[in-house]
Each structure stands twice: as structure tokens, then as C-alpha cells.
Amino acid sequence: MNALLLLQSGAGNLAAYLAAHVLLCLVPAFFIAGALSALVPKESITRLLGRHAPKYLSYPAAAAAGSVLAVCSCTIVPLFAGIYKKGAGLGPAITFLFFAPAGNILALSYTGVAIGPDIAFARLFLSLAFGIGIGMIMALIFSRSDEAHDQGEDVAFAGRGKMRGAALLLLLALAGLLLAGTLKLDVLNRSWASLTLPISGTYAIQAWLDALVPSDPTRGKEGLSIQGVILIGLLGAIGLAAWLGLDRRTDPDNPWMQALLALVIVTLSVAATRWVPGPSGLTIELPGRLGAVALLLAAAAWLGLRKLDSYERQEWLWESWRFVKQIFPLLVVGVFVVGVLRELIQPEWIQALAGANTVIANMTGVLFGVFMYFPTLVEVPIANMFLDLGMHRGPLLAYLMADPELSLQSILMITAVIGRARTWTYVAWVAVFSTLAGLIYGSWVDGAGLAGIALMLAAFLAALSGVLWLVARSNHRHPIPLPPR
């Protein structure tokens, strides 16, 4: 295959992703992660999600927090990093990381409408059970290092036991901003007004962009719009202002930091509109989402500028920038590589590899989830395409379980947060459980009796219990030494 075509596919995938998904999802997520790290006392997190919190409280709370966030795996990683750094146990943090992209309300509703309520229910039940299960398994396997993390993180904040009201309100405003940017409600999507800029040649510009970054909805290629180009330019300006302002920690209110906040407000406001090229110019539609985003941006800006002192504001913005520097470059690399791989993988392979409910077929569904990653909700029409090409419903569920969790870019980003050993252990368990989910559901679709399915599940659980017993025994023999008092 032509190397230039592969390069175009990777660059086009990256450009389309940045324009379509990063701004209203990932930008608020980074600010939330920074606020969690800088403004929330460690005790506020550990009381609910800490490794010593009751399991009947921490794991359901982690899943419940994820269920309301209609975000993809890339957006959830900064939030995961924020709560983990602030003292959440590895187990509850992993449950939050797993359940939010696959089991959120919006993804389940769309799955039920587009593919069928049976798939939606299976996705909900298995995502919840496996998310909690994988979290508990990871907490057991890495109990010693988790204890060390619990003792070592945020020692400077150990004396702060109560969150300030301003910090809580800021977090709520940022969470509302994230939801306003992602929820697909009619009141948010509907255009309430519009204005037309008398700019000639917009059709020609859009045609050139379509040729540069082709759109193909059947393969998840979203293309690039005029608005997308402008948003990418604004995103670059945000990065430049952050680099010049936030790396200079001696002056918390320097002009570059003020420019950064202004650019964020402008960029998210532009992202909340819709730009439509037309014969009389460029029409800018003003949906309800713009009003919600503007209101919440104003609330967050007022709280940050008026209710936080200079030090708190500096720490919040600097922690947000630290997460960006740690995670965002890996996101860029991952999205580019996925674009290249997507061009290499042919949809026709699906029927040959995943047309029956076998172990290989379900593992193929998991692999497609890794190398043909699509943002949340986009994977549902792609799953419909897989069905039309002959994929069995068992491997289809394996794909829907793995796609939100195991994208290449999210694996790279998670590695930056918890390290290679824990990341690849998590990846292995997600792959195993996703394959098992497909096999169980596929067997039921093929008419297998409940007794046979129960026997298969019991054999797996017995083997798993034996392995975990050996791990627990090893951890008990080699407890982590406590630090000197």
C-alpha cells in the first residue's frame, strides 16, 4: 500500500479527532483532573474511593460516577489519573476507568436503539460485573504497590480534611461543562438562532478539505471541516499560551496565563456552534449547547478568578497542564497510529475471522476494538456495519466491550499514569473478560442451554479463584514494609 496514503490516513484521523472530539470532552476533563489534584483534600477521595474504604461502597460508587459520563476512553484517562493521584485505591480507580466508557447511560441507550436491547442489557450487566471484578483483581495483584502508593501520594495534603466550598462549586461547574458538551439532548442539539457571514468561496474550501481528509462514515472516518481547521488552530494557540505561561510558576497571573483562559473560553464557545458552508457565505448555527457551555464557562471563570486565591489558581492550572504534558502527546501518537492501521485493516476480513462464536472469533473482536478504535457512540454504527458484514453477535459484544477500553492511545496514556506492568496486566484482564463475555453471550444466541453456559462460567471462575488465591498467598508472605514513624 502507498506510504503516502497511510501517512494521509494517520494525519487525517488525527486532524478529524482533534477537531471533533478533544475540545468539548478532553479540555474540561484535564481541568477537572487538575482541580482534583490541586484543590481536593486527599481524605475527600480516600473516604469514598480509597483502598481502605468498604468495598461495598467504593466499587459501586466508582461505577456510578462513570455511568453519568458520556465520554470515550481518551477522555476518561485524565479523570482516572486525577482520582488515582489524589488517593483513590487502584481497584476502584480501575472500575471507574473500565465502566465509564462502556457502561455510561448514553452509550447503553444508543446501543439498545441501534442494535438491540439484548446487546445493551448484556453490555450493561457484563460491564458492571467485569468492571468491579477487574478492579478487585487488580487491587489484589498489586496490593503491595497500592499500599506504597497510598502512603506516598500527596503527603503535603494529608492534614487537609475538608474541601472548600469554592473548590466543590468549581468541580461541579467543570463537570457540568463536560456533560453539556457531550450529552445528545434535543434542547442542546437544536439550533435556536443563526447568523451568516458573507464569506465567498467556502464551498471550494470545504471541497479541498474533503479531498485532503476524505470522509467515510462506514469506516468511522469523519473528515475535516472549516470549523475543525479553526479549532485546531485555537488548540495550538492554547498549547503555546500554556507553555509560555504555566511553566513560569513565579508569576501566577502573568499575561500568558490570562491569554490562556481567554483562549479556552473562545475555543470551547466556537466548538459548541455549528458552521455550515453555503452559497451566500458561512452560516454559524447557535444551538442550545452554546448557551449551556457559555453559562458554565462563565461560572467556572468567576469561581476560579474570584473565589480561589492566587496560589490555588496557579496550582489548579499548573496541575492541569502537567496532566496535559503527561498524557496528550501519547494521545496524539495513538490516534495517528490508529489512523494508519485502520487503512490497513479490511472490513472484509471480519466475516472470515469473526463469523462464528469461537474463541478465535471473539479474540478477533477484541483486537478490532484495539486497532479500529472509534470514539464513544461512533462504535455503535460501526458495530452495525460489522453485523452487516457477517460478524456473529458474540464477537460483536466482545468488540463493544473492548473498543471503549483498549484503544491503542488509551493504553499508552494509562501506562504514563500507572506504569507498564499494571497497564498490561489490566489490558490482559480486559481482553480475557471481553472474550469471555462474547463467548457466553454468543452461546446464548446460538441456543446453548443455561446449564452449559453456567458450567463454562463456573470452570472459568474456578480457575480464576485458584490463580488469585496463589497471588493473595504470595502477598501475605511478603507484606510491604511500613515507613518509619
Image (tube, rainbow, N blue to C red):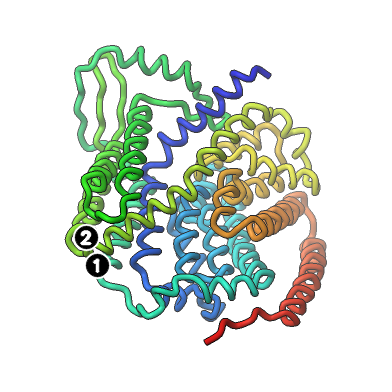
**Relative depth, front residue between 366 and 240:** 240
The location of residue 236, given as percent across then percent down, is 36, 35
**What's under tag 1, amino acid-wise?**
Ala
**Relative depth, front residue between 321 and 172:** 321
Compared with 322, 240 (above or below) is: above
Q: Is residue 265 visible?
A: no
The location of residue 176, given as percent across then percent down, is 32, 56
**What's under tag 2, amino acid-wise?**
Leu
**Relative depth, front residue between 261 and 377:** 261
Q: Residues within 10 Å of mark 2 (few under 14, many from 20)?
A: some
Residue found at x 33% / y 59%? 316
**Relative depth, front residue between 288 and 118:** 288
Q: Quadrant of the N terminus?
A: top right
- The single residue placed furthest to the bottom in the displayed view is 485
Where is mark 2, residue-wise? 303
Res 200 → quadrant: top left
Residue found at x 64% / y 43%? 370
The location of residue 447, given as percent across then percent down, is 77, 53
**Circle 1/circle 2 CB separation < 8 Å:** yes
Where is mark 1, residue-wise? 166
Left or right: residue 360 compared with residue 113: right
